[in-house]
Amino acid sequence: MAKIEFKNIRHAYPAPPGQPTVYALEEINQIWEDGGAYALLGPSGCGKTTLLNIISGLLIPSEGSVYFDGKDMTSLPTTERHIAQVFQFPVVYDTMSVYDNLAFPLRNRNVPENKIKERVHAIAEMLELTDSLKNRASGLTADGKQKISLGRGLVREDVKVIMFDEPLTVIDPHLKWLLRSKLKELHQQLRVTMIYVTHDQTEALTFADQVVVMYEGKVVQVGTPVDLFMSPQHTFVGNFIGSPGMNVLPGEIKNGQVSYHSHVIELTQNYDKIPEGKTEIGVRPEFIRFDSSGFPVNLERVEDLGRYQIATVKHAEDMIKILVPEEQEIPSENPRIVFDPEKTHLYRNNWMVE
Ligand code: ADP
Ligand code: MG
C-alpha cells in the first residue's frame, strides 16, 4: 500500500507544429494518504486520465515527480509500480473461463496454483461471480465482463494502488449503484489505496472519503463530500457539485458590508479586512428561503420533484434557484427571499474569499 505524492507535476502533450504548448495538467502538488479512497472528479477533458497515467507509468510527466511512500517513481516502468488499473471498457479474454480470467494476473506473476485458487475464490465471492467461475467469459453481459475486469484489478495481493478509470460507464444504471457500494465495501476490507475516476458526482461522492475536484488541468479542491457541499473553494466546485448547483451572483463589498444590487446581504463572516470592490456571492439553492424580510423577486417557475420543489426566481437579470421542502408554500404574491448568513460565501475571480 502506498502514499502517493505529486511534486510540481505539469504535463503537455506534444503540440502540432506551429501551435503553442498547451498544458493538459498545470502544476499539481498533492499528497494522497496510504489506504485512502479517492475520487478524481471533473468534466471530460480536465486531465483525469492524464493524471492516472502518470501514476501508473503509462505516461512520464513533462515536469515534476511522483513518489510512492517517499520513493521517486517518475521514470520507473509500469511493471515495477505494483499498480492495478481498471479501464472504462472491460478487458476480458473471451475464450477463457471466468476463473482463468481472474487467475490471469496471478499466473503472469508465477503465483503458485493453490494460492491462485484461494485468491480467485475470495474475489469471486466478493463480486458474486462464484456461480459463473466455470463459464466462458464470452457468454457474459457487459456488466458481467466489467465485474471480471474489476476482479482482475483486485485479485493481486502485491498491489499498492488500484485505479479505476470511469469503470461503470458500460454498466446498467440499476447495477451501477450495486457495484459502487461493492467497491466501497471492498475498500473497507482491503484498505488498499484506491483512486476512482469519474465525471459523475454521485459516483464520486458515494465511493470516496476524499474527492479531488479537477477543472481545466488543475486540482481546484480536495475534500470530503460535506466540505465540497458546505464550502466550495471555487465557484466551479459550487456549480459542479449539487443539483442544482450553487447560485453565483454579482455583489459588491463596501464599508465592510456586502450588497447585491443595493440590497444589503447579511453574512455571519466578517469581511472588514477584504478590499472593497466587486465580488461574487455564492449561495446554494438549499440555503435560500422565502421570507418577507428579504429582497423582492419575480417567481418564474416551480418544478415539483416529489420530496422537494425547485423554484426559479428572477432579480434584475439574474435567475436564482431555490430548493423548497415539499410541505412549504411558495408565496404567489410579492415573494421575497433571504440567504442563510452562515452558508453564503464570497468569491473573487472564482476563488473563495475568507
Ligand atoms: P479526462 O480524462 O479528464 O477526460 P484527459 O486527461 O484524457 O482528460 O485529457 C486532458 C486534455 O489532454 C484534453 O484536452 C485532451 O484533449 C488532451 N489529451 C489527452 N490525451 C492526449 C494525447 N494522447 N495527445 C494529445 N492530447 C491529449
Ligand atoms: Mg478520461
Image (cartoon, helix red, strand yellow):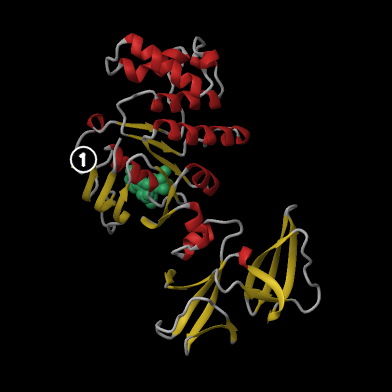
Of helix, strand and loop, which one carries label 1? loop
Q: Amino acid at mark 1?
A: Met
* Res 215 visible: no
Please name the residue that numbered disc 1 is placed on.
73
Quarter of the image for the N terminus: give it. Answer: top left
Q: Quadrant of ligand 2?
A: top left
Which residue shows up at 60% across the image and 71% down it? 340
- Specify whether residue 345 is in view: yes
In front of the other: 329 or 144: 329
Q: Position of residue 159 (x, y in %)?
A: 31, 30
**Label 1 packing within 10 angstroms: few (<14), some (14-19), many (20+):** many
Q: Nearer the viewer, residue 261 or 265?
A: 265
Q: Quick one: which residue is furthest to the bottom in this view?
A: 255
Decide if residue 302 is on the left or right side of residue 165: right
Left or right for 212, reference 107: right
Where is 298 relative to 79, above or below? below
Q: Position of residue 301 (x, y in %)?
A: 74, 66
Residue drawn 40% across and 24% down? 152
Image quadrant for the C terminus? Answer: bottom left
- In percent of the image, x 55 and y 46: which residue is there? 202
